[in-house]
Amino acid sequence: MNILFYSAGEDTELWTAALREALPEAGITVWPSVAAAIDYAVVWKPPAKLVAGLTPVRAVFNLGAGVDTVMELAWPAGIPLVRLVDAGMAEQMAEYVAYAVLRRYREFADYEEAQRERRWHQRARLDKSLFSVGILGIGVLGSAVAETLVSLGFPVTGWSRSRKEIAGVRMFARAELDAFLATCRILVCLLPLTNETRGLLDRRVLSRLPRGAYVVNVARGALLVDADLIALIDAGHISGAMLDVFHDEPLAPAHAFWHHPRISVTPHVSALTQISASVAQVAANIRRLEAGLPVSGVVDRVHGY
Ligand code: NDP
Ligand code: OXD
């Protein structure tokens, strides 16, 4: 069995060593080297040239949960594209969002500002039962985030294409977006970037949030219209945002997000890809495909995620 490997900006040595250990029977070629016949491609942000030169493969594995960059490429029809499903990211995402929510709810940013000014000021406790967190996208990661927030005692609402069921979470279906938005003191975005979701978080949608709402985007930067978010924060409608993902990464030094006093920026770290868990999942899926068994994480090419 031959595997073609490519990962943009990742540690190729570590990935291929882990792949060799998990699949000792496989030959591994690192693109742009070529092998006579390739059975599986294992890629992260592959260039178009890799796809153009690919001989027919049994499956393409995307080394990430989000498939927006692979979906832009012209893969031959009929080849399963398989994404990572959790693979150690759900726990990290739940930690990150719990931090963002607690930071906002317990007003830690205000205490940090007070400390800078050496100001002793105890703020009144906010009513948690009124501090509802809404999650856009109740998939693998959104569900883990929802369960964590429920366990912390927050009222939680969720919005997804098909209506989901999680104990303690009030769910909204696709057509109910405005009703969902009205529930959100904090809005967490965990949607995939697709033709339907690109630019979803624009002035119209963000304006539907209650005054003072806070925005957390941990999905993809292109879901958000940056200028609309800044305008609504500056107008006082949105109280602030914690952003982990951006249209262009790394975020340009001149971008307004870096120095906006109400925006916190992290460099796409809310859920980092874990080499050992990811390789274990890819290897298990390859073994299942070799045995003629179905695998989870196959991307729906029509819906784009
Ligand atoms: P899933 O595919 O499991 O979940 C996606 C969710 O979004 C599903 O609930 C789906 O609905 C919903 N959805 C998709 N399109 C629409 C739409 N048009 N309208 C309403 N709901 C929609 O993905 P994951 O949870 O695994 O990952 C989510 C995203 O998180 C990834 O695509 C990626 O971009 C991002 N990510 C970011 C990371 C980071 O470090 N910042 C790390 C990992 C992922 P339904 O359930 O009905 O299909
Ligand atoms: C992913 C990511 O999609 O790391 O897995 O952003």
Image (tube, rainbow, N blue to C red):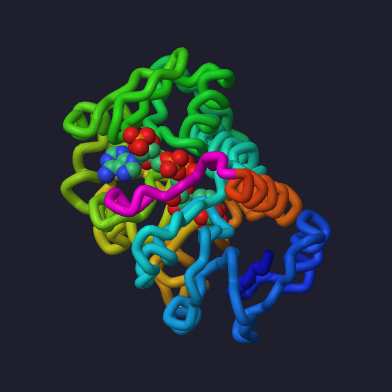
- Where residue 222 appears, as percent x and y from the top left, is 34, 61
Q: Nearer the viewer, residue 220 or 297?
A: 297
The residue under the point 40% across, 47% down is: 240
Magenta stretch contains residue 302: yes
The residue under the point 36% across, 28% down is: 158
- Where residue 177 appears, as percent x and y from the top left, is 21, 34
Residue 262 visible in the picture: no
- Where residue 148 appears, as percent x and y from the top left, is 57, 26
Ligand 1 shows up in which quadrant of the image?
top left
Q: Is residue 179 above or below residue 108?
A: above
- Where residue 231 appears, as percent x and y from the top left, is 25, 57
For the stretch drawn in magenta, the main secondary structure is loop
Q: Nearer the viewer, residue 71 or 147?
A: 71
Q: Nearer the viewer, residue 53 or 163?
A: 53
Residue 204 visible in the picture: yes
Report which quarter residue 17 is drawn in.
bottom right
Q: Nearer the viewer, residue 47 or 257?
A: 47
- Left or right: residue 207 compared with residue 16: left
Q: Is residue 278 above or below residue 246?
A: above
The residue under the point 33% across, 22% down is: 171
Question: What are the residue bounds of the magenta stretch?
Answer: 292-305
The residue under the point 57% across, 21% down is: 152
